[in-house]
Image (cartoon, rainbow, N blue to C red):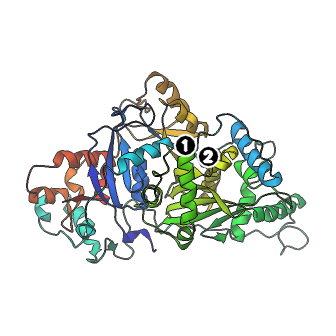
Amino acid sequence: MAAAESSLSIVEYFRGEDGYRCGYCKNETGNLSHGMWAHSMTVQDYQDLIDRGWRRSGKYVYKPIMNKTCCPQYTIRCQALHFQTSKSHKKVLKKMLKFISKGDVSKVMGGEEPMDSHIEDVVACNYEYRNESHVSQAELKLLSVDHTERAETEDKDKEQMKEEVNVKKVESSSLQIHVAKGTPVPGEPSHSTKIVHALPKPGKGADLNKPPCRKAKDIRKERKLQKLLQNQMCTCEGSPLQAGDQVLLLQNSKSKPNQPKTVEDFIFASLPDDAAHKLEVRLVRSSPPSSQFEATFQESYQVYKRYQMVIHKDPPDKPTINQFTRFLCDSPLEAENLPNGPDCGYGSFHQQYWLDGKIIAVGVIDILPYCVSSVYLYYDPDYSFLSLGVYSALREIAFTRQLHEKAPDLCFYYMGFYIHSCPKMRYKGQYRPSDLLCPETYVWIPIEQCLPLLEHSKYCRFNQDVKAVDDGRIKELGRVRVLHKGTIMPYSVYKKRRKGPSDEASVHQYASLVGQTCSERMLLFRS
């Protein structure tokens, strides 16, 4: 697919009035959240939404009502570029290395792998079906952009709104609106950004035309890398990493003298020629499904089914293909490829862990403009002893660092929600350095500053500046974009045409939750 300018986000908003069963404290009606059904969504819009506390489960996007829900869920992100492995992380990485190289299956007992549960996603799955959209595709077709009543709807913003409406061309046969060539899309990464690679400087030895001599240590390490890549290969859509990526991995795996080992030092450590096992990590696009994803769908589903039955104690008839598809395969995110983005593009993916030719684990992830967002992990219970929850999280952090080399803005690893009131869910705070999102001002605060506050109250405003406000708050409700009967219009126009009781309170609540920027970019469906 081409660049991101060809698509728009279309959402239906559900007010969070009913309580649901909480998967943490088991309160039958204590779990409160707002929700939207996303028929389509750009990666930039979703990035901006998760930076305001939203999260997706399939195509359902939800935001906990933080000051009312029984177990507040704070968005957490790890600063991947500065991540340092802890002792427990190193233990898991060494265990995997020992297993791959020697076939050692010594099982370490203890609760060192909570990362596999992702309980919040299981909870989200429960109410996804209650708020499913019943709008037909015909109702979502974009037929026109409203040009009438523009003069009377906004006097002071006349020129801004005129530009917003006129840059769009509508295709009546599709869900997409195409922007004129060269027109920048608000909030999306600039296409003009270019990465300039400097040419290597000539050496200063006897022959000035030759580069400096390489150290024997670096040559040995590169040879080791070539060998280990045969055993611990990373592939994107079935294709091995290019030579440049292999050199990049080598550079990332180098630890500075007297510095702790990096996660890459462990993941890409040298393996013996007669290694007992071969581990390969493949990245396949799940939405829209790539040929590699479709070819491995059944095998992946069987792993998910066993995982749900053994780990989460689901009855045999519950982990259905339909549930698997809607929960972990369907995604509203549009596949986007940008010149300054990662080679694999942005969107939704499955990261498959292949051991000796079979899938043993799958990490469901979204690749967004500023982060890799972890959605879910499921694995073959026979390999629980490998602590695959922790191992996959460390691999995803390393993957984030790898993508950063091509996409400089992509430098965070989002782990979903941190729930301090549930001791089993505090493990995410062990991936340091990390930040929690302030639920009132939507700024990131180092987790070390947040934990003392959470010890006193389960709901906290982390931003200690009492004068600080939400910079993205709604300021002009009339500028919220609406899709009504196939026509895009500002809410100020729709409001005058609407028949029946006013929906202003609901639209205002929606706009305040998604923020002014997203409310002007996304299309709010109105019947």
447 with respect to 87 (left or right):
left
Q: Looking at the figure, which quarter contains the C terminus?
A: bottom left
Task: Please name whichever residue, 464 or 238, is drawn nearer the observer in this view of the structure.
Answer: 238
Q: Tell me which amino acid carries mark 1.
A: Ser
Q: Residues within 10 Å of mark 2 (few under 14, many from 20)?
A: many
Task: Name which quarter of the figure residue 43 lies in.
Answer: bottom left
Report the front residue among 26 and 405. 26
Q: Is residue 516 in view?
A: yes
Q: Secondary structure at mark 1?
A: loop
Q: Label 2 near label 1: C-beta < 8 Å?
A: yes
Query: Residue 150 at x, y = what percent?
Result: 14, 64
In the picture of the structure, the residue carrying the numbered disc 2 is 389
Q: Label 1, label 2: how many angstroms apart (C-alpha)?
A: 8 Å
In the image, taking residue 505 as reference, residue 99 lies left or right, namely right
Kindly identify the amino acid type of the residue bearing the numbered disc 2: Gly
Which residue occupies the foreground of this view, 403 or 126? 126
| On screen, residue 176 above or below 24 | below
Residue 9: which disc? none
Q: Residue at x 36, y 68 (%)?
A: 7
Q: Vertical placement of 416 versus 141: above or below?
A: above
- Circle 1 sits on which residue? 117
User: How many numbered discs sit on the rendered protein?
Assistant: 2
Percent coordinates x, y for residue 265 in the rendering: 75, 51
The residue carrying pointer 1 sits among few (fewer than 14), some (14 to 19) or many (20 or more) residues within 10 Å by Cα, namely: some
Q: Residue furthest left?
A: 500
